[in-house]
């Protein structure tokens, strides 16, 4: 028999790309004081680089092509039920979940977004922050509700934009903070 500690929350992480936030969440989940157990990785993209972390850390993954959103979401929901998933962490997942999907996991979906919400919802956040001459940007972890990037904020981290920053350099600086912020936000909501 394994571990005698408190039961961990079974979690699925949804990704579309590099999966650096997924990696940081997996590393966090392995810590003793983490409330999470990552049971499943979901991707809409067969070529998502982050899928490699499933292999490296031996976590099962499922890739769904989103040709038909409502059929795909039904399949995802049955996968969640099979694996008894109680929390969904969106980590660079670039598809928008339907209202029905969100309702069926009400209060159980978190997202990380690369801006200081409510500023710069949606895509191209760094580009817009730089072209508006913002002095700061950052990242936000929030609950997902039916309006895009508008759910209750859990934690934010500010990052200074310097004059020499490009979209690429800013994205990199913010990503480093994202990797710390997501675990911290999860601890804040679900600490054991
Ligand atoms: C992260 O910066 C995340 O905040 C952003 O995509 C990147 C994924 O990086 N998410 C969004 O823009 C969601 N709208 P990762 O795949 O290396 O974690």
Image (cartoon, helix red, strand yellow):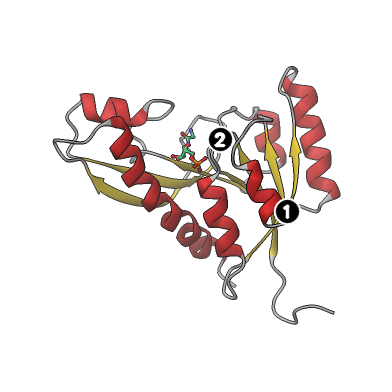
Q: Residues within 10 Å of mark 1 (few under 14, many from 20)?
A: some
- Which is nearer the eye, 88 or 105? 88
* Distance between the alpha carbons at the discs numbered 1 and 2: 17 Å
Location of residue 19 (image quadrant): top right
Q: Is residue 87 visible?
A: no
- Residue 78, image x and y in percent? 84, 39
Image-based side of 139 in relation to 72, left or right = left
Numbered circle sitting on residue 24: none
Location of residue 25 (image quadrant): bottom right
Mark 2 lies within 8 Å of ligand 1 (Cβ measured): yes
- Residue 31, image x and y in percent? 58, 71
Q: Is residue 60 visible?
A: yes
**Quarter of the image where the N terminus is located:** bottom right
Residue lying farthest to the top in this orientation: 67
- Which is nearer the eye, 61 or 49? 49
Image-based side of 170 in relation to 141, left or right = left
Q: Which residue is mark 1?
A: 59
Image-based side of 185 in relation to 2, left or right = left
In primary-sequence order, the first of circles 1 and 2 is: 2
Tag 2 secondary structure: loop
- Which is nearer the eye, 45 or 68? 45
- Residue 58, image x and y in percent? 73, 56
Tag 1 secondary structure: loop
Q: Which residue is mark 2?
A: 17
Please report the residue visible at 25 percent of the width from the left and 32 percent of the height from the top: 166
Please report the residue visible at 78 percent of the width from the left and 45 percent of the height from the top: 80
Q: For the residues labelled 1 and 2, say whether their Cβ atoms are less than 8 Å apart.
A: no
């Amino acid at each position: 028999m394994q571990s005698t500690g408190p039961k961990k929350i079974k979690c699925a992480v949804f990704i579309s790309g590099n999966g650096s936030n997924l990696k940081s969440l997996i590393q966090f989940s392995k810590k003793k004081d983490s409330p999470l157990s990552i049971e499943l990785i979901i991707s809409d993209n067969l070529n998502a680089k982050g899928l490699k972390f499933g292999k490296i850390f031996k976590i099962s993954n499922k890739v769904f092509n989103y040709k038909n959103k409502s059929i795909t979401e039904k399949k995802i929901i049955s996968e969640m039920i099979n694996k008894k998933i109680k929390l969904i962490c969106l980590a660079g997942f670039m598809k928008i979940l339907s209202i029905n999907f969100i309702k069926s996991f009400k209060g159980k979906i978190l997202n990380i977004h690369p801006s200081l919400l409510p500023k710069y919802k949606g895509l191209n956040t760094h580009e817009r922050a730089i072209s508006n001459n913002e002095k700061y940007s950052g990242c936000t972890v929030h609950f997902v509700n039916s309006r895009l990037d508008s759910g209750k904020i859990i934690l934010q981290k500010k990052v200074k934009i310097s004059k020499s920053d490009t979209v690429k350099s800013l994205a990199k600086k913010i990503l480093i903070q994202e990797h710390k912020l997501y675990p911290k936000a999860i601890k804040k909501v679900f600490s054991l």
